[in-house]
Image: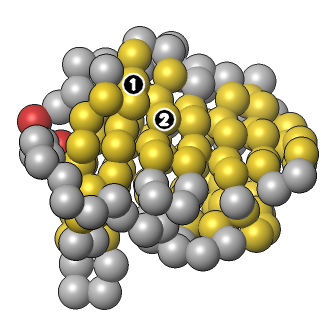
């Protein structure tokens, strides 16, 4: 199911079902599955282990919205399998995405310039770079 949600002065698409969430902007896309996350057009990534494991993936350029969108929905109403919260501040806007419990990470934060992934510090993570795509495997 595809939903249009607000982003900057337009919208981005969220395509989801029980085991996949795909966010599509005008110039980029990322896909989250229970054990993998694919991020297109990334410039770099880093991992931090404190009380939780934090993975930061930086985009080549800021996410750009589609324009002239009709039927843009309020993301705070919920999306069947996912809890999605939209926050707009003076300096940026972001989505907090909480996946179903079958996913191996706690939540994802999507900003205009990066993707943050939070999970248990006990999880092992492997990275694969193919061209301009980063694939993150979680075990």
Tell me: residue 56, above or below residue 130: below
Name the outermost residue toward the bottom.
Answer: 91
Q: Residue at x 23, y 27 (%)?
A: 79
Q: Residue at x 77, y 32 (%)?
A: 137
Instruction: For marks 2 and 1, give the CA distance.
Output: 6 Å
Q: Nearer the viewer, residue 119 or 113?
A: 113
> Disc 2 vs disc 1: Cβ atoms closer than 8 Å?
yes
Q: Position of residue 46 (x, y in %)?
A: 76, 63
Helix or strand or loop: what does disc 1 sit on? strand
State the colouring used for the structure image: secondary structure
Q: Nearer the viewer, residue 113 or 116?
A: 113
Residue 1: quarter of image: top left
The C terminus is located in which quarter?
Answer: top right
Q: Nearer the viewer, residue 79 or 130?
A: 130
Residue assigned mark 1? 16
Q: Residue at x 10, y 42 (%)?
A: 71
Labels 2 and 1: the sequence-earlier one:
1
Q: Position of residue 75 (x, y in %)?
A: 18, 43
Along the horizontal axis of the image, is 83 left or right of 98?
left
Residue assigned mark 2? 22
Helix or strand or loop: what does disc 2 sit on? strand
Q: Position of residue 57 (x, y in %)?
A: 67, 61
Along the horizontal axis of the image, is 42 left or right of 52?
right
Could you tell me if residue 95 is visible in this image?
A: yes
Count of marks, rendered view: 2
Q: Residues within 10 Å of mark 2 (few under 14, many from 20)?
A: some
Could you tell me if residue 86 is visible in this image?
A: no
């Amino acid at each position: 199911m595809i939903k249009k949600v607000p982003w900057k002065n337009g919208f981005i698409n969220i395509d989801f079902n029980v085991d996949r969430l795909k966010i599509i902007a005008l110039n980029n896309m990322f896909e989250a599955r229970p054990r993998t996350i694919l991020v297109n057009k990334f410039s770099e990534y880093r991992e931090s282990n404190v009380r939780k494991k934090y993975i930061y993936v930086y985009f080549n350029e800021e996410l750009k919205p589609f324009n002239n969108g009709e039927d843009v929905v309020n993301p705070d109403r919920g999306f069947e399998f996912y809890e999605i919260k939209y926050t707009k501040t003076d300096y940026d806007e972001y989505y907090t995405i909480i996946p179903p419990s079958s996913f191996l990470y706690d939540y994802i934060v999507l900003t205009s310039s990066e993707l943050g992934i939070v999970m248990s510090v006990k999880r092992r993570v492997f990275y694969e770079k193919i061209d301009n795509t980063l694939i993150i495997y979680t075990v």
